[in-house]
Image (cartoon, rainbow, N blue to C red):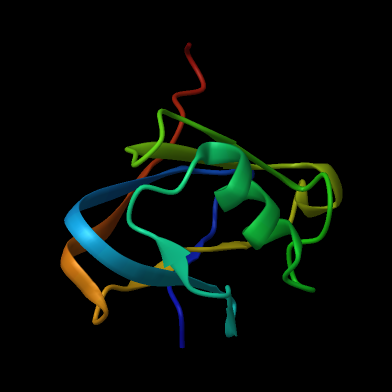
């Protein structure tokens, strides 16, 4: 079962790509994106996640430079729900893809 974030504030998920070639995918709650190039742009990554039925349009914001690292912030229809931690598959990358989760501080 994928890791879940149990707190009311959605976590910020950071996706880091350390690669020189190839593709990777991200899985959210059992649904996998199409293969993404190692130097994907933030808008392309956001579009790929929004095409997943369990995310949907307008429910994730992706920021960062092409090739990452990227910050994923889930919202919209997903506010107040358990947010699955995105899982990378970097088997087809000439490098690695990793995901880290940071919980926003309520005191910020």
Residue 13, above or below 2:
above
Residue for point 46% across, 79% down: 2
Using the image, determine if residue 86 lies above or below residue 108: below
Q: Is residue 52 above or below residue 67?
A: below
Image coords of residue 37 (percent x, y): 40, 60
| Residue 33 appears left or right of 54 | left
Q: Where is residue 87 shown, x and y percent of the image? A: 40, 71
Q: Is residue 86 above or below residue 105?
A: below
Judging depth in this view, the residue of 47 and 87 nearest the camera is 47
For image coordinates 37% across by 70% down, the residue present is 24
List the single residue furthest toward the front. 21
Report if residue 25 is visible in the image. yes
* Residue 15 % position (x, y): 35, 49
Residue at the (34%, 42%) spot, across then down: 67
- Camera-nearest residue between 86 and 64: 64
In the image: residue 25, left or right of residue 39: right
Q: Please tell me which residue lies in front, 45 or 1.
A: 45
Residue found 41% across the figure and 38% down from its top: 70
Residue in the foreground of this view, choosing between 69 and 107: 69
Say left or right for 16 vs 11.
Answer: left
């Amino acid at each position: 079962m994928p890791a879940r974030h149990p707190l009311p504030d959605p976590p910020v998920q950071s996706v880091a790509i350390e690669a020189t070639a190839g593709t990777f995918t991200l899985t959210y709650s059992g649904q996998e994106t199409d293969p993404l190039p190692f130097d994907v742009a933030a808008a392309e990554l956001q579009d790929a996640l929004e095409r997943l039925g369990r995310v949907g349009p307008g429910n994730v914001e992706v920021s960062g430079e092409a090739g990452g690292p990227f910050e994923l912030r889930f919202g919209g229809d997903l506010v107040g729900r358990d947010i699955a931690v995105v899982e990378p598959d970097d088997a087809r990358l000439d490098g690695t893809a990793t995901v880290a989760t940071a919980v926003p501080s309520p005191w910020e």
